[in-house]
Image (cartoon, helix red, strand yellow):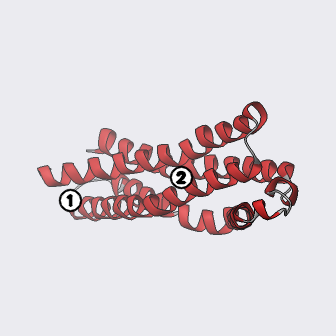
Amino acid sequence: MSTYQSVIKIVAVTGALFLSGGIAAHGSATVPALLKSISEDGTSSHAMLQVWRRVYEQGHANSPKIAVLTTVAFAYTAWGANSQQTSTRIPILLYSAAASLVMGIVPYTLIFMEDSNRKLLKRAAEAKHYSSSSASGEKRPEDLIDQESNERLLRRWKALTLTRALLPMTAGVLGLLAITHYE
């Protein structure tokens, strides 16, 4: 196996595990911190939504790039395994499955998370709009947006996000399995 093929395999596995960790951190660290800041620090629902929106935007800006790079690396690795003269096709299947799992975050997000994302983004936009006019005597964002509903939505988003993190994590494990057991 050549050095560049080894590097591509490392990029694929590392990318998948890095992506999984980033996605999981949003759910396992950010959401509990936001909820705790409301219950213990008196942070407003408005502020919680704004911070969540910023976290969402960071993930939305960075995760697709990592997912594409990782998928291409796994697909190339599967193609390379196909061209090798081996007695088993298992590495090809493992790398192909890994590539599919990484890209699986896209349909997962669209099918299972789109509704929660849309609602949270809408509420964040409304909270931002009302915060700029709060000095004019209008109701505060906390009065306009149901805090309990926001917290429920955020908890749902957390569960969906942690589940989504399993896709690239499984891809990374399959890549490691192919490297360690079949090469």
Residue name at image x 28 percent, y 59 percent: 77
User: Looking at the picture, how far across and down is residue 117, in whole percent?
Assistant: 67, 63
Verify CB contact (< 8 Å) between mark 1 and mark 2: no
Q: Label 1, on which residue? A: 84
Rendering coords of residue 128 (x, y %): 68, 63
Give the number of the mark in front: 1 or 2: 2
Residue 115 x %, y %? 73, 67
Q: Position of residue 102 (x, y in %)?
A: 47, 58
Quarter of the image holding residue 49? bottom right
Q: Is residue 26 left or right of residue 176?
A: right
Task: Please indicate whether residue 153 sits to the left or right of residue 128 in the image.
Answer: right
Q: Is residue 126 above or below residue 182?
A: below
Quick one: 53 or 29, which is closer to the camera? Answer: 53
The residue sitting at the front extreme is 136
Which residue occupies the foreground of this view, 64 or 136? 136
* Extreme-left residue of the structure: 2
Give left or right: position of 33 versus 150.
left
Q: Secondary structure at mark 2?
A: helix
Which residue occupies 53% across, 49% down? Answer: 23
Q: Residue at x 27, y 47 (%)?
A: 10
Q: Is residue 1 left or right of residue 87?
A: left
The amino acid type, in three-letter code, at marker 2 is Leu
On the rendered image, what quadrant is the C terminus found in?
Answer: top left
**In this figure, which residue is indicated by the disc labeled 2?**
167
> Which of the 4 image quadrants contains residue 125?
bottom right
Q: Amino acid at mark 1?
A: Gln
Closer to the camera in the image, 92 or 170: 170
Pointer 1 or 2: first along the chain? 1
What is the C-alpha distance between the residues marked 1 and 2? 27 Å
Q: Quadrant of residue 75?
A: bottom left
How many residues crowd around disc 2 within 10 Å: few (fewer than 14), some, or many (20 or more)? many
